[in-house]
Amino acid sequence: MTVPFDHQQSAHCETGVISNLMRFHGLRVSEPMAFGIGSGLFYSHMPFLKLNGIPVTTYRILPGHIFKRFSRNIGVEMKRMSFRDQDEAMRELDRVLDQGLPVGMLTSVFYLPYLPKAFRFHFNAHNIVVFGRKGDEYLVSDPVMDETTTIHRTALIRARFAKGTPDTKGRMYYPTVVPTGPDLKKAAAKGLRRVARDMATTPLPMFGAKGIPYLAGRLRKYETKLGNRRALLFLGNLIRMQEEIGTGGAGFRFMYAAFLQEAAALLEKPELREKAKEMTRIGDLWREFAFEAGRMVKGRAEAGSTFASMADKLDVIGKAEQMFFKDLMRISK
């Protein structure tokens, strides 16, 4: 069974899957618009939550929540399932495919054999779409790939049931109701207000825009507190979370800038075009931070690059984002 699925490469897996699945069901929504309606942008640095002994830093809301917020704001009804039994999970996948419906699912990047080895690491929140099968080979639309590909049943099971954080549990999902002619203007405005509020007013210091200078303060003490070797490990993991896992700090800012450009016309708020330019400049700052920090981790730092100078860069970004989202909250009212 093969579903006539229009695959388009995207910047991020979850927003790419949203855009591709919606297009199949007759609703054309760009990836940036899906990101904005789904209120995907966020920031947090959580020293109390560790992965491999290193604090977690995120540049977006939790995996799966962009789709949930998008669906709620647009009026899409989704069927979401998880499984304990692998055979049951594959039978249910086959059943839905036989109905002519593409299926989104959560997988581990590490166990997707069609990805180059250099791109595989233990990250259990990668979204793909399976849109058909030929015997034991399943047809895959992976948003990060320029073309569709295939995966063997055995490999797909392994990717769907990878152990770790989060536990994939064979999770799969597909739309059951997609409205015709939804109120995109209302949905975009709602998504815009949510991001502005969460980034500007979340009370705890490690969340929202003020979480960036919070991290800067901790980064400034890394070398003294942890020693050079472990401090570089922490910094390297920070960059990996920013630039490798998902779309990261700069990439999400560029995508949000694209959303603001679309929203300016949709909401008839021309001031959002200026905010889009401002967000692009902030994205450039994130990219410069990642580049210089990456050189430090690899032992190629330029003269003057220290943990203190990296913290200074984060302070600049943090102040820029705090001002940005306070103003965006004003505009979005």
Image (spheres, grey):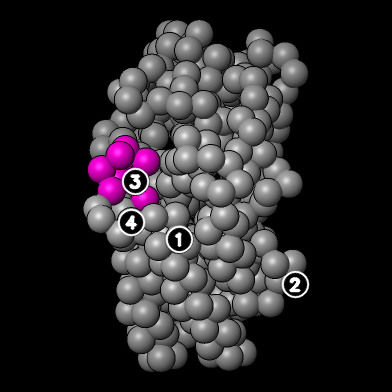
Q: Earlier in the sequence, mark 2 or mark 4?
A: 2
Foreground disc of the pair 2, 4: 4
Disc 2 marks a residue whose amino acid type is Pro
Disc 4 marks a residue whose amino acid type is Ser
Label 2 environment density (alpha carbons within 10 Å; few <14, some 14–19, many ≥20): few
**Location of residue 136 by image quarter:** top left
| Res 84 seen here | yes
Reply above or below: 50 against 187: above
Disc 1 marks a residue whose amino acid type is Ala
Foreground pick, 1 / 30: 30
Question: Magenta span covers which residues?
Answer: 293-301
Label 1 environment density (alpha carbons within 10 Å; few <14, some 14–19, many ≥20): some
The residue that mark 3 highlights is 296
Disc 3 marks a residue whose amino acid type is Met
Labels 2 & 3 near each other (Cβ < 8 A): no
Q: CA distance from mark 1 to mark 3?
A: 12 Å
The residue that mark 1 highlights is 308
